[in-house]
Amino acid sequence: MTDQRPIAVLGGGSFGTAIANLLAQNGFTVRHWMRDPEQAAFMRDNRENPRYLKGVTLLPGIEPTTDLRGTLEACELVFVALPSSALRQALQPVAELLPGKMLVSTTKGIEAQTFMLMSQILESVAPEARIGVISGPNLAREIAEQALTATVVASEDEALCRSVQQALHGRTFRVYASRDRFGVELGGALKNVYAIMAGMAVAMGMGENTKSMLITRALAEMTRFAVKLGANPMTFLGLAGVGDLIVTCSSPKSRNYQVGFALGQGLSLEEAVARLGEVAEGVNTIRVLKSKAEELQIYMPLVAGLHAILFEGRTLAQVIELLMRGEPKTDVDFISTSGF
């Protein structure tokens, strides 16, 4: 395998580092691009990314670099693990290098101004590139520590899906394929919002029944939203829907859960984000999601409630009381009354 072209990973955060290690473990040379020269130099010399994945040794096949042009020129397959706020500005200046490349987004977010998902931003920057996404219950530290993990690669380009499966599939990491790129990516972005609420509920000592109710209603709500926008509801029964929602809403390792937990302990949003030290995509997503739900007239009481907590001074207890007083609707929206 080592005679193949190197594979690029863009982004020096926890997920980018975990993906780079997976690729190196599978015998590939990895050009791992990041913006910060000090970070790249430290990772080259010490074989560790202490800010984002402390204690995880970088394998020899990984070459940390700050040369974006050189990285893109050398690689056909590019995993894009940049925060949603940085994606466009990083790739726009090198757009002429991207036609024909396989660009695979790993970022679970939505661009605030445009309501574009990351793969749609990639498409707008590089209309002639081949685009895919990966999403699933994928905590970066667990991937790096070789806990058994599965993910979904989604694209209408079947050859791209096969390339990603061959690159990432290994002893501890299983890659399933889907054609519903939009649904898979939307699931990854939406669940971050509900993880904030789940973290708050745990910090405030709410019961397991309550948490289970929140997770299940969250799944109903995000599916309703995604289907309105054209996704396949069945996608949400898979790894990128219910799988990702469960892990993000129940693990203290999830960044969004950590923000929610800090809020539940009484910290302000600014203090909660400062304590985390890196971006929790759910905070960015909640604003755009609420306005989009209102615009499309989609019933999303949890999103409205969380927005009220984060930006309108409500408490979680008040929001749950409103939820309990709300009119009971059907349990599952997509079961046909004919029984099929």
Image (spheres, rainbow, N blue to C red):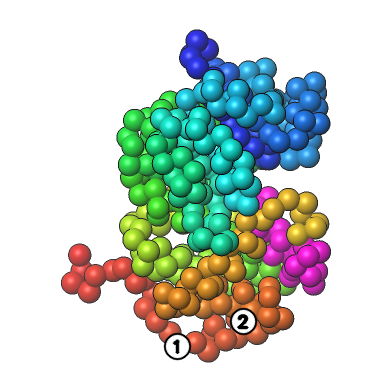
Q: Residue at x 48, y 71 (%)?
A: 292
- Report whether 276 appears left or right of 143: right
Asked whether 221 falls inside the magenta stretch, the response is no
Q: Look at the numbered discs 2 and 1 and tell me whether their residues touch, using CB distance below 8 Å.
A: no
| Mark 2 neighbour class, 10 Å CA radius: few under 14, some 14 to 19, many 20 or more | some
Q: Residue at x 61, y 73 (%)?
A: 306
- Report whether 305 appears left or right of 154: right
Total marks placed: 2
Q: Which residues are magenta?
A: 252-272
- Report whether 101 appears left or right of 321: left
Q: Nearer the viewer, residue 184 or 132?
A: 132
| Mark 1 neighbour class, 10 Å CA radius: few under 14, some 14 to 19, many 20 or more | few
Quarter occupied by the C terminus: bottom left
Give amino acid for label 2: Val
Could you say whether the residue bearing mark 1 is in a helix, strand or loop? loop
The vertical placement of 108 against 221, above or below, is above
The vertical placement of 307 against 187, above or below, is below
Residue 327: numbered disc: 1
Residue 309 at what x, y percent from top left? Answer: 67, 76
Give amino acid for label 1: Glu
Q: Nearer the viewer, residue 123 or 57?
A: 123
Q: Residue at x 74, y 40 (%)?
A: 52
